[in-house]
Image (spheres, rainbow, N blue to C red):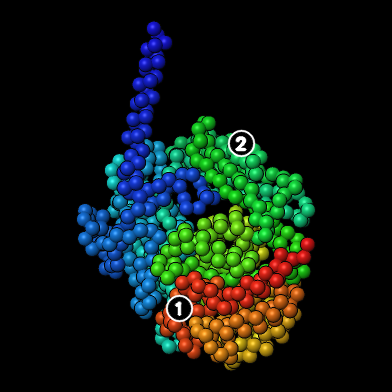
Amino acid sequence: MLALTTMRILRSLTLLTAVLAVGATSAPTALAADGITRGTTYADAPDNRYLLGGDWLFRLDSAGAGLTQRFQRQTDTDGWAKTSIPNAWNAGDNSVASMLGTVGWYRKDFRLPDGRARMDWLVRFESVNYRTSVWLNGKPIGRNTGAYLPFDLRLPRDALKRRGVNRLVVRVDNRRLPTDFPPSGLTGSGDPAGGWWNYGGILREVYLQRVDRIDISSLLVRPELPCATCAATVLMRMTVRNYADRPNSVSVSGSFGGKRVRFGSKGVPARSFATFSRRIRVAKPRLWTPATPHLYRARFTVSLRGQKVVGHELHSGIRSIEVVDGRLQLNGRAVALRGVGLHEDDLVTGSAITAARRAQIVAQAKELGGTVIRAHYPLHPEIHELADRQGLLIWSEIPVYAIKTRYLKRLEVRKLAARELEENIIANQNHPSVMLWSIGNELSARPGPVQGNYIARATRQAKALDPTRPVGLAVAGYPAAGCTPHYAPLDVVGLNDYFGWYPGPNGQIADRDGLSDFLDGIRACYPKKAIVVSEFGAEANRDGPVEERGTFQFQQDFFNYHHAVHASKPWLSGSFYWALQEFRVRPNWDGGNPRPNSPIHEKGLLRFDGSKKPAWFDAQRLFAATPQLGAP
Ligand code: GCU
């Protein structure tokens, strides 16, 4: 009898919790209506994220005060247009005003996927250009400066609606300053300067992140390989954060390559952090290289009193990359890498590229036969993963791009650079594809104490955060610059080689025949550093005589000549063509081409529509003929 009553009570209890849970978690239809789907577009992620997709509203409006309250109260959509995220509001608008930037607003109404009171919530933006302010239900919740790197904002409990509709309002200002990354500026002819189009908007995905009392605040999986035939060790370190107002006993378990790893348990005081760390040994590691991109799955489960609250999975690759006697070595072999520079750009969407476009970019770079991709800014997380899986190395650079020394001199600029460098390393260090941290591109070609100070600080900082990767800088390849002591802290000097394309100051690079001696001069300057050609390229948009700039024939000849000189330097660790594909750069761009097609940058081996130029095939042939990963 008793047993029966208990059974009945238990059954009704389970029913009750189920109802409550359903009540608490929004109905699938509501979630779908809000365009919320569990998960991320990339695999290496915690499992408590929800893609905040579906319909968003957008408007351009540079009016100032009172707008947020008005937008918060507004019940209709007057003045707003439907859009989806990622979004670049000025994709395809090639006007000066579009390049200069303006203020855009986004609005998103959503219900929480899980309304239980114990849950905290974050909103994560993967990349917003440039200055972002965010409101939840009319309450300001945070700001961010800078694009290409993710930032999280907490949704305050006192503003959050657990049931019903929440409203997120996001103000985005893409007007740049000369102290921004990249900086604004004017060309000699008074046009807005810049190396790529200033797309405004929420350029990558947005996620809600559910925090069930404990969240993972940082995760490191760092393989170390003393030699190519040695056993490897893998440092696995996780920091968790207790969001609750009371202490919690947390346990962490995991695995690496299917082997269980125990991290143990810790009491985490209220509203504070704890770190779990283990170093494991892999006796006979299968090494990661672009030709054999072997990955190990690393899994983590965080539990409270035996109940999982969050999990995280990522794919790690065991390899070493270092500079030895002036050569870049991958797993102990001196390399002669080949590759391309690229932008996340698209004819239609601008830099708010889709997953299909991301996959296409990586597939194109692989098809070309190179082993390296380089961009002027941290690439999308998914591109990192595709590179891990498909075997491409990434020259990972922060957009400290042609910043003038008088601005680099300012403390706030160097502080922002340091922050970007740190965020890039924290966001992307678990990817085996990342070969190097680049601290900038084309700062003054005659570095003085200001730049020297920046290089020394940034290199020190990068090494402190990640002692397993070299640090580099891409510099304008001008012979008159000579040798400089200010590059001493660097491991890798990247040379942007435009001999025979641009004249350079006082015509010093007008004649391509100066290239070989220039490279030898650089070698003599920095015998212990790895030297790569981080860029070389020529615009091409028509058929014509080989001696005529801007023709496909000139581009082919340029490519073959430069590649032959690069290949003739056995000490050169890499040569990267700029660029894989055409992209939008700025109004009145000519790029050295007497018959340009502004604003399109046409040095690409692929046209903007993806079709191949003749030089593509030269590059493919020469890359295939180069023993890029070194002799066995
Ligand atoms: C520079 C710069 C690139 C630019 C290239 C060019 O070296 O780093 O961003 O596109 O020159 O002029 O084509």
Q: Are marks 1 and 2 in contact (CB under 8 Å)?
A: no
Q: Is mark 1 within 8 Å of ligand 1?
A: no
Q: Nearer the viewer, residue 632 or 438?
A: 632
User: Nearest the camera: 326 or 628?
Assistant: 628
Query: Quadrant location of the C terminus?
Result: bottom right
What residue is drawn where x is 68% and y is 45%? 279
Q: Secondary structure at mark 1?
A: strand
Residue 198 can be seen in this image: yes
Where residue 299 sits in the image (x, y, percent)?
Answer: 58, 43
Residue 387: % across, % down:
58, 59
190 on left or right of 479: left
Placement of 148 over or under 35, stated as above or below = below
Of label 1 and label 2, which has the lower sequence position? 2
Badge count: 2
At horizontal 32% and vertical 42% (from top left) the residue drawn is 29
Nearer to the camera, 70 or 464:
70
Q: Residue at x 40, y 15 (%)?
A: 7
Which residue is disc 1 drawn over? 600
Q: Quadrant of the N terminus?
A: top left
Q: Would you identify the image quadrant in which residue 290 lies?
A: bottom right
**Residue on which the image places disc 2:** 264
Type of residue at label 2? Answer: Gly
Element type at marker 2?
Answer: strand
Q: Does residue 395 show up?
A: no
Q: Nearer the viewer, residue 430 or 445?
A: 430
Residue type at numbered disc 1: Ile
For residue 328, above or below residue 29: below
- Percent coordinates x, y for residue 64 in the rendering: 28, 66
Residue 490, x across and y down, in percent: 66, 70
Q: Does residue 554 appear to the left or right of 9 in the view shown? A: right
